[in-house]
Image (tube, grey):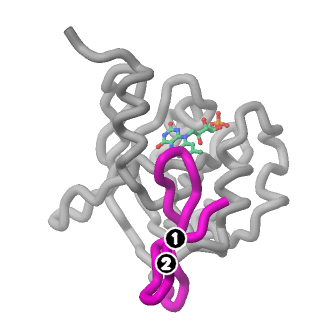
Amino acid sequence: MAIDAAELRHAMANLAGGVNVVCCRAYDQDHAMTATAVVSVSLDPPLVLFCVAHTSRFWEAVSKTDQWTISILAEKGRSDAEWLATKGRPLDRQLDKVRHERTDAGIAVLSESLTWLECRTFSQTTAGDHDIVVGEVDRAVVKTGEQPLVYWRSRYTSLATPGSASAGNQ
Ligand SMILES: Cc1cc2nc3c(=O)[nH]c(=O)nc-3n(C[C@H](O)[C@H](O)[C@H](O)COP(=O)(O)O)c2cc1C
């Protein structure tokens, strides 16, 4: 018999992950969602994926368009990640609080990021209560000099730097 949701959540909390924000435009407005379920999939063609819950408004939005971005957040993007993971926040002008730029296609990418990717949907498949959205990467912009934002055991944290006793936490 399969384990239940609480057990899986508890078990997977030990999987440290980089924090990302996925953005798209649909219904004439910006949509954005904090996501750790982001994976690099293939080099040829260049594919990445993210997983999106059917309960999120982002799922509805990304199902209406084939263009989206992934911003891989820097440590400084923590408040952006917190805001864009807040259930029920107003969608209208939700990016007013978030430093961002726009791709040529007009999709937001976050300024407090290490890398951002511009993607087109390659496939979208249902897996349980989520969809797995695979995208072909049209453009990648890579920055240097910042540390990544990490999520581990239900907390935002940082990579330990040489000489530090432990990673900084909340
Ligand atoms: C650190 C972190 C990572 C998350 N990763 C994901 C994810 O990979 N996929 C997902 O569907 N939701 C994820 N969530 C939850 C969404 O960010 C959250 O449900 C958000 O409010 C969805 O926004 P929406 O309902 O406005 O679309 C994550 C939340 C946090 C705090």
Residue 79 image position (x, y, % from top left)? 73, 60
Q: Nearer the viewer, residue 141 or 88?
A: 88
Mark drawn on residue 165:
2
| Res. 106 in view | no
Left or right for 69, reference 111: left
Can you tell which quarter of the image residue 90 is in?
A: top right
Query: Which residue: 38% across, 24% down?
Result: 7
Query: On the rendered image, what quadrant is the C terminus found in?
Result: bottom right
Q: Residue at x 41, y 73 (%)?
A: 139
The disc label shown at residue 98, or none:
none
The residue under label 1 is 167
> Was residue 169 drawn as part of the magenta stretch in this picture?
yes
Q: Residue at x 70, y 59 (%)?
A: 80
Q: Is residue 71 left or right of 27 when viewed as pictured?
A: left
Of 109 and 51, nearer the camera is 51
How many residues crowd mark 2 within 10 Å: few (<14), some (14–19), many (20+)?
few
Q: Position of residue 149 (x, y in %)?
A: 54, 67
